[in-house]
Structures are given as C-alpha cells and as structure tokens.
Image: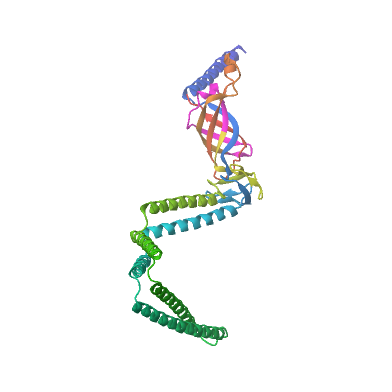
C-alpha cells in the first residue's frame, strides 16, 4: 500500500505541473479566448420625402428586396406638374423677348419708320407751300382715279367671295381637288388685300385734296411740324435698336426664369422616393392616401448583406481586444453554422456606468460597446437575433 502511494503521489505532482505549465504557456502565447454576447444589427435608413404631400403609391412591402436606385414610393404630383408647365412657359417667353432684343430692329420696322418720316415731311411741306389751282385739279384727278380703282377692287373682291363660297361647297362634296380649292382661297386673299390697299389710296387722295382746298393753316402747320419731330425720333430709335439696359433686363429675366424652371423640375423629382442602397424593406410607416410632412418616414430599408454583432466587453477584457481582430460568431437559429467576423469598432466610453466607481470590483462592472462586422450574403442573419462571439484574446 505504501509502495502504491509512493508511486501515485509523484505522478500526480508531475501531471499537475504539466497542466499548470500548459496554462502558463497558453497565457503567455495569447491563445486565451474571450466569449461575448449581443444582438445582430444592420445599417438601416428611414426613407422620407423632402416636400409635403399626399402619398399616392407605395411600391414595396415589408420583406421585399430592393436595389439601389429602385423607385419605392410616389407623392401626388399634380401641383408640381402644373408648376413645371408654368415655368416652361415663362422660360419660353423670356427667351423670345431676349432673342428679339438681341436681334435688334427688323428691316421692315426700319423701312416703316423711314416712310413715316418722309410722309410727315411731305405733309409739312404741303401745308407750308399752300396750294395752287393746278395742284387742286391734280389732287381731284388723283382722287377720281383712286375712287375708280377702289370700285374695281371691290368688284373683284365680290367676285372672289362668290367663287370661294361656291367652290367651297363643291370641295366639301368632293367635286374638286384640294389644290384647286386652295387656288380660290388664294384669289380671295389677294382680292381682299387689293381692296384694302385701294381704300387706303383713296383715303390718302381725299386727304391731299382737302389740304389743297383748305390751304395752309398755322395750327395745322404746327401739328405737322410736331408730327415730323415725333416721326424722326421714332425712326432714330428703331434704327439704333434696343438699349443695352433693356437687353440686360431681358437677360436677367431669362436667368430668373431658368432658375424657377430648375426649381420646378427639382420639386417634381422630389415627388418620387428611391432606394439609396441594395437592401431589404424592414418596415413601412405610411399608407397610400396619407398626408406626409417633410421628413416623415415612409419606410425603413436595411443593408442585410453586411451586418454586425453589437456586443459588450468588460473593462478587464477590453485590454485584450484590438481593432481588426477576428471573431467566430454563432446564433441559436443555426447551431451548425458559424460566421467569421472582424472587430470594426471599439467604444471609447463605458456604458451602464454606476454613479460612483470606487472599488476595484465596481470598476470591473464597466462595459464597452464593440462591433463585429459580418458578411451575410444569404441573409441568414436577421436584425435583432441574439448571437455569441468567441475572440482570440490579444496580449
């Protein structure tokens, strides 16, 4: 019996020595593990409109997978489309005004202004020179010819009207071609213009005859001189073209119209809500028909492909945890699986801190939040899942 004890005691001592030596080496080599627990978390974003309005459509439901840039919801855009139409019309008008001013006066406007000056000079000269009997006779002859021309033009106009009315009915019944019918329309337009021109010439002849018969009057001469001054001033303005100030004002109005158009387009664009990244709809917060204020959440999207474990380490464990350390994560839902992770964040401030930390034991109750980044390509890990992590402690 004593021999057995003599053999067992040394063997036990040797075994204990080996165990303690391995534990010491493990501690020295930094292979001791740290076990942490927490919950799976994801990057999630509340999607909301920037402008107020009534929700017209929501195109996704909870659990739907969405791609970056996918349209998610729409507001009623009736008001925004009307504002855009108005802004487009204002822009077209401002552009047309500026183009007209930059182009300057048209040649026909210059010719008309010059003709007005010549007529005003002639009228003034006629009044200043008075009228001779021969001039009166010539004016009477001119009036007679003008009246005859007017009667002829009116007769031709009546004929053109009758032809147009008659062949309009024939064309409606398919009796003549459109080309033939358009010929009668052209004849009517020409006859109308000719009659108007003849009437103008007759009126001018009457005015000249009246001037010849009445002779020069001081009041009429004064009026004619004033009319000449006005005509010359108008001609000078037309010939010079628009002032630079007017062009600058028109250009500024076009720029303002362009800015208003950009705002209208942006307002219309903001009636649609798009996903900012690939993910999954975690929740919805508004239904079609709801009136939404700016910033009111419509739905929440989470990045399920890249999740992390939110865990907490004690102060004594914190000294052996480093950024980018690897960790092995498991969840109760999949006991036969594990995920490789990496520590991506270590909080610099303790949480759940007691009001007064005095003793060593109380200080060990301090915990620090850490994040273990995980890849989740098959979306097996869900937000809120409890999970455990094992970290090989650093020395």
Give how far across and how far down residue 384 sits, in percent. Answer: 62, 37
Give how far across and how far down residue 48 sits, in percent. Answer: 58, 44
Residue 77 in view, yes or no: no
Viewer-closest of 21 and 7: 21
Question: Quadrant of the rendered structure where residue 352 is?
Answer: top right
Indicate whether 357 appears above or below 340: above
Indicate whether 110 appears above or below 28: below
Viewer-closest of 148 and 252: 148
Viewer-closest of 34 and 256: 256
Q: How is the image coloured?
A: rainbow
- Magenta segment boundaries in residue numbering: 310-337
Residue at horizontal 44 percent and vertical 52 percent from the top:
253
Count every numbered label the image shows and give the total: 0
* Viewport quadrant of the N terminus: top right
Give how far across and how far down residue 70 sits, in percent. Answer: 55, 51
Magenta run includes residue 331: yes
Question: Quadrant of the rendered structure where residue 165 is?
Answer: bottom right
Residue 351 in view, yes or no: yes
The residue positioned farthest toward the top in the image shown: 2
Indicate whether 156 appears above or below 100: below
Magenta run includes residue 395: no
Viewer-closest of 62 and 17: 62
Indicate whether 365 appears above or below 60: above
Residue at horizontal 45 percent and vertical 82 percent from the top:
153
Question: Quadrant of the rendered structure where residue 213 is?
Answer: bottom left
Q: Is residue 337 left or right of residue 262?
A: right
The residue positioned farthest toward the bottom in the image shown: 175
């Amino acid at each position: 019996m004593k021999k057995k004890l003599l053999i067992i005691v040394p063997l036990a001592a040797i075994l204990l020595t080996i165990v303690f030596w391995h534990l010491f080496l493990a501690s020295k080599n930094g292979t001791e593990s740290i076990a942490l627990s927490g919950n799976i978390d994801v990057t999630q974003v509340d999607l909301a409109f920037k402008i107020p309005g009534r929700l017209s459509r929501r195109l996704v439901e909870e659990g739907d997978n969405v791609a970056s840039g996918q349209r998610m919801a729409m507001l009623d855009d009736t008001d925004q489309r009307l504002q855009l139409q108005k802004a487009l019309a204002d822009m077209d008008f401002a552009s047309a005004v500026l183009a007209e001013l930059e182009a300057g006066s048209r040649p026909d406007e210059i010719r008309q202004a010059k003709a007005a000056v010549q007529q005003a000079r002639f009228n003034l000269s006629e009044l200043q020179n008075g009228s001779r009997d021969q001039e009166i006779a010539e004016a009477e002859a001119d009036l007679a010819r003008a009246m005859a021309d007017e009667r002829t033009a009116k007769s031709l106009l009546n004929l053109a009207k009758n032809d147009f009315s008659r062949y309009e009915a024939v064309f409606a019944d398919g009796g003549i071609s459109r080309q033939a019918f358009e010929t009668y329309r052209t004849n009517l337009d020409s006859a109308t213009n000719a009659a108007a021109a003849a009437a103008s010439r007759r009126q001018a002849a009457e005015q000249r005859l009246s001037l010849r018969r009445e002779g020069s009057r001081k009041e009429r001469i004064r009026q004619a001189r004033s009319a000449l001054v006005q005509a010359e001033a108008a001609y000078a303005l037309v010939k010079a073209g628009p002032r630079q100030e007017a062009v600058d004002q028109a250009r500024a109005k076009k720029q303002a119209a362009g800015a208003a158009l950009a705002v209208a387009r942006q307002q219309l664009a903001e009636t649609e809500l798009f996903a900012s990244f690939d993910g999954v709809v975690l929740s919805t917060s508004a239904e079609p028909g709801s009136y939404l204020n700016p910033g009111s959440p419509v739905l929440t999207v989470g990045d399920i492909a890249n999740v992390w474990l939110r865990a907490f380490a004690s102060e004594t464990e914190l000294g052996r945890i480093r950024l980018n350390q690897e960790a092995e994560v498991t969840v109760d839902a999949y006991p036969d699986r594990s995920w490789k992770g990496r520590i991506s964040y270590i909080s610099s401030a303790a949480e759940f801190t007691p009001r007064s930390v005095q003793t060593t034991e109380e200080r060990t109750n301090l915990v620090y939040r850490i994040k273990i980044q995980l890849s989740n390509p098959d979306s097996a890990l869900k937000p809120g899942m409890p999970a455990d992590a094992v970290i090989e402690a650093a020395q």
